[in-house]
């Protein structure tokens, strides 16, 4: 989960990293009550990078000028994203610009400090200019000094930069971040440093122990559902694809394997959901059954999905409830299919969306579930239950193709 | 690694991922479960296990403990592991998933210094079919035999075991090192253990996108492993968003290839190491070519 610049700067200010005087603008008229001095810069608060190129950064000299510019900026999408907030900030011309970052490197299992004496980095080949220091043991300020020295800094500037890195590290640990970046760090002629822009990625796994982040996460999730292009909520347990076969499973590995098998069998995987963990926007603890119910609902609501492939292996708590959820879902879909076929003129299959459910289930705890479902299996074509994964995939792919063909026939009939 | 059936085991925490069935399964398998630790519940009984408030109380009562299985809330994992280590227990299996990565960084700094073996987090643990079960692996999918399995996934490990069992190929040891982004024990450690293990005749390595542990394993297999190894990589068609965790900028910044962490990079590594790669779990048995 990423934060916006004004949120990042608030954090930087609190931890003691110098930032320019700035003010959050929710509405152009807020500029009438500006407490910072002109000239100022107005910055569009969006997630996309390089916003200056898209007109997201403007210098203004007077209140009239500022209000007119702000009005325009609130209506100017930056790479497709409209800002909800602008940031008004004192104008500042640095002598030099640096890049600084603390990032969690999962390959070495340690945080890494990054630094460069240029802010405009060619990420394809940063080469030798970018310095890095791995924080092997418990952090101590010498790691920050090592980075500053590696960057070629000396004397007072070396100390003020390492001091910034030290505070960045504190913030990184305090808030459970994946990335904290100051880019650029402005350096004045007199050697004063100033964080001019910053970026923060929060590790989703730790959101639950930071109530203030939980609130932001819920806001982003809500915004995400309104406008999918705006979302910056990264979710390990969700994979969004556009295909017709939605996949649910009780582990990342088997979901990925299922996705590969579907693709190899000529099918098109749609959204995949992992039911092992709580979903990101869940603020209260959930049970497996809760997630299964929700997962089925999410996939059924996705109009592009025609078949839901549920792959469960191993052991799950509340096996009887699992069977109940699956059979309820199948019964519900069955009644919808029936009502659709009885009244073909009013509602064709293309309009009423009713995905078929293919369930692959294996493991002794699932015997109960299997037995309950076996009786349903023969009753309804909305549900297929199998034990062999390759077969379940083949059935799901075949069903998705049959449904597509039927839909085409239906819509052709409608045309005639 | 002490995997003998008489080694003493405790369970720390009883979250969603460990149920009565799991505990009973372990007991039925002959695992020497001596006690449980659940702060605030000391003196009670749970699943027929005596419950204590502190690990040191268990050690005081039953003597040295070989393995602790941790199943607390992910935010309490670090504390539980540190408490376990303070009682000189040096084999820790962490079932809980979604442990904050910086907690793992803190823990690994300590375990690397004390040579404590951490399996997980987000791992169903270890099973030696027919001998001992340490964790939540579904025993009914396993059968004793000569194939060692090392994996990062939980469910995919079961999937592979099930395919082997169906094909009449039993298993010697199966371990999942855990599917969180930062985990304790590595593929390399387990390849070495499986290579030295006398019952293991062949090894199946199950990987997935993210990190570079499969690549490191491929190099290690080419250099040091004499037993036949078959690999399976899930997620070839999963288009993961480029982020600092798996690939992209950080990779190039500190001198890694742009395809760092991708399934493709792993497949290439195994090809280079001349390790056969199965394209689906059900294709693994024939690649093993063991006399049935």
Image: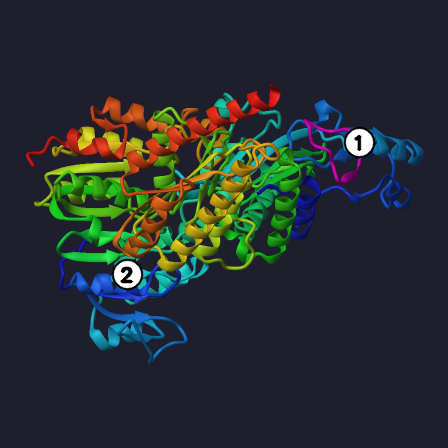
Could you say which quadrant of the image residue A93 lies in? top right
- Neighbour class for label 1 at 10 Å: few (<14), some, many (≥20)? few
In this view, the residue in front, B137 or B85, is: B137
Residue corresponding to mark 1:
A75
Tell me: B280 left or right of A83.
left
Would you place residue A49 above or below residue A276 in this image? above
Q: Is residue A84 magenta?
A: yes
For marks 2 and 1, give the CA distance.
57 Å
Q: Can the viewer see residue B31 in this picture?
A: no
Could you say which quadrant of the image residue A54 lies in? top right
Check the residue under mark 2 and report the chain it is in.
B
Decide whether the magenta segment is chiefly helix, strand or loop: loop
Could you say which quadrant of the image residue A289 lies in? bottom left
Q: Position of residue A25 (x, y in %)?
A: 81, 42
Q: Are marks 2 and 1 in contact (CB under 8 Å)?
A: no
Tell me: A117 left or right of B197.
right
Q: Who's the residue at 27% across and 51% down the image?
A: A363
- Neighbour class for label 2 at 10 Å: few (<14), some, many (≥20)? many
Q: Position of residue B200 (x, y in %)?
A: 11, 42
Would you place residue B116 above or below residue A397 in this image? below
The span picked out in magenta is: A74-91
Q: Residue furthest bottom?
A: B43
Q: Position of residue A416 (x, y in %)?
A: 60, 19
Please name which of the two marks, 2 or 1, marks the residue nearer to the observer: 2
Q: Residue furthest right?
A: A64
Residue corresponding to mark 2:
B22
Would you place residue A98 above or below residue A252 in this image? above
Q: Who's the residue at 47% across and 24% down the image?
A: A405
Q: Is residue A179 magenta?
A: no
Q: Position of residue A223 (x, y in %)?
A: 66, 42
Q: Who's the residue at 20% across and 37% down the image?
A: B204
């Amino acid at each position: 989960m990423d934060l916006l610049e004004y949120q990042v700067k608030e954090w930087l200010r609190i931890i003691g990293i110098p930032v320019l005087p700035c003010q959050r603008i929710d509405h152009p008229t807020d500029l009438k009550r500006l407490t910072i001095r002109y000239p100022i810069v107005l910055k569009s608060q969006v997630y996309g990078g390089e916003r200056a190129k898209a007109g997201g950064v403007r210098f203004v000299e007077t209140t009239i000028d500022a209000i007119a510019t702000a009005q325009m900026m609130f209506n100017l999408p930056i790479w497709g994203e409209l800002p909800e907030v602008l940031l008004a900030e004192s104008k500042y011309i640095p002598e030099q610009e640096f890049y600084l970052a603390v990032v969690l490197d999962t390959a070495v299992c340690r945080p890494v400090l990054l630094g460069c004496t240029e802010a405009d980095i060619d990420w394809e080949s940063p080469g030798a200019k970018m310095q890095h220091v791995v924080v092997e043991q418990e952090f101590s300020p010498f790691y920050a000094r090592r980075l500053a020295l590696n960057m070629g800094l000396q004397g007072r500037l070396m100390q003020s930069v390492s001091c910034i890195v030290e505070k960045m590290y504190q913030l990184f640990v305090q808030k459970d971040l994946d990335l904290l970046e100051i880019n650029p760090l402005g350096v004045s002629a007199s050697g004063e440093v100033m964080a001019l822009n910053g970026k923060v990625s929060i590790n989703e796994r730790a959101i639950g122990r930071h109530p203030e982040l939980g609130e932001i996460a819920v806001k982003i999730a809500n915004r995400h559902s309104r406008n999918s292009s705006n979302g910056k909520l990264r979710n390990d347990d969700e994979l969004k694809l556009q295909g017709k076969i939605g996949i649910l499973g009780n582990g990342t590995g088997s979901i990925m394997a299922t996705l590969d098998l579907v693709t190899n069998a000529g099918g098109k995987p749609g959204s995949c959901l992992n039911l092992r963990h709580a979903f990101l926007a869940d603020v209260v603890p959930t049970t497996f059954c809760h997630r299964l119910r929700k997962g089925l609902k999410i996939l059924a609501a996705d109009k592009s999905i025609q078949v839901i492939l549920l792959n469960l292996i191993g052991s799950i708590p509340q096996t009887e409830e699992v069977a109940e959820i699956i059979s309820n879902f199948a019964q519900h879909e069955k009644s919808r299919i029936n009502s659709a076929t009885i009244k073909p003129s009013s509602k064709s299959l293309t309009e009423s969306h009713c995905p078929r459910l293919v369930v692959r289930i294996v493991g002794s705890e699932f015997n109960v579930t299997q037995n309950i479902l076996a009786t349903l299996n023969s009753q309804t074509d909305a549900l297929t239950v199998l034990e062999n994964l390759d077969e379940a995939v083949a059935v799901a792919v075949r069903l998705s193709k049959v449904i597509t063909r039927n839909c085409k026939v239906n819509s052709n009939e409608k045309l005639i | 690694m002490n995997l003998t059936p008489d080694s003493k085991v405790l369970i720390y925490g009883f979250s969603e991922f460990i149920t009565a069935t799991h505990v009973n399964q372990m007991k039925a398998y002959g695992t020497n479960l001596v006690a449980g630790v659940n702060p605030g519940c000391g003196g009670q009984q749970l699943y027929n296990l005596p419950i204590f408030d502190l690990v040191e109380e268990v050690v005081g009562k039953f003597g040295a403990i070989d393995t602790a299985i941790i199943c607390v809330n992910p935010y309490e994992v670090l504390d539980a592991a540190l408490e376990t280590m303070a009682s000189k227990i040096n084999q820790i299996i962490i079932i809980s998933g979604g442990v904050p990565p910086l907690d793992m960084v803190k823990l690994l700094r300590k375990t690397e210094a004390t040579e404590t073996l951490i399996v997980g987090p987000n791992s169903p643990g270890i099973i030696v079919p027919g001998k001992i079960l340490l964790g939540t692996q579904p025993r009914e999918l396993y059968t004793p035999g000569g194939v060692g399995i090392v994996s990062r996934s939980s469910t995919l490990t079961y999937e592979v075991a099930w395919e082997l069992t169906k094909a009449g190929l039993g298993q010697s040891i199966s371990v999942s090192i855990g599917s969180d982004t930062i985990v304790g024990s590595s593929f390399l450690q387990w390849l070495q253990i499986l290579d030295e293990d006398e019952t293991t005749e062949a090894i199946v390595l199950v990987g997935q996108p993210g990190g570079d542990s499969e690549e490191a394993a491929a190099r290690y297999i080419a250099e040091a492993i004499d037993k036949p190894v078959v690999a399976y990589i899930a997620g070839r068609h999963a288009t993961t968003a480029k982020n600092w965790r798996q690939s992209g900028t950080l990779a190039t910044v500190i001198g890694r290839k742009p395809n760092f962490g991708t399934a493709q990079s792993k497949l290439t590594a195994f090809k280079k190491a001349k390790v056969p790669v199965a394209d689906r779990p059900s294709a693994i048995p024939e690649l093993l070519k063991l006399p049935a």
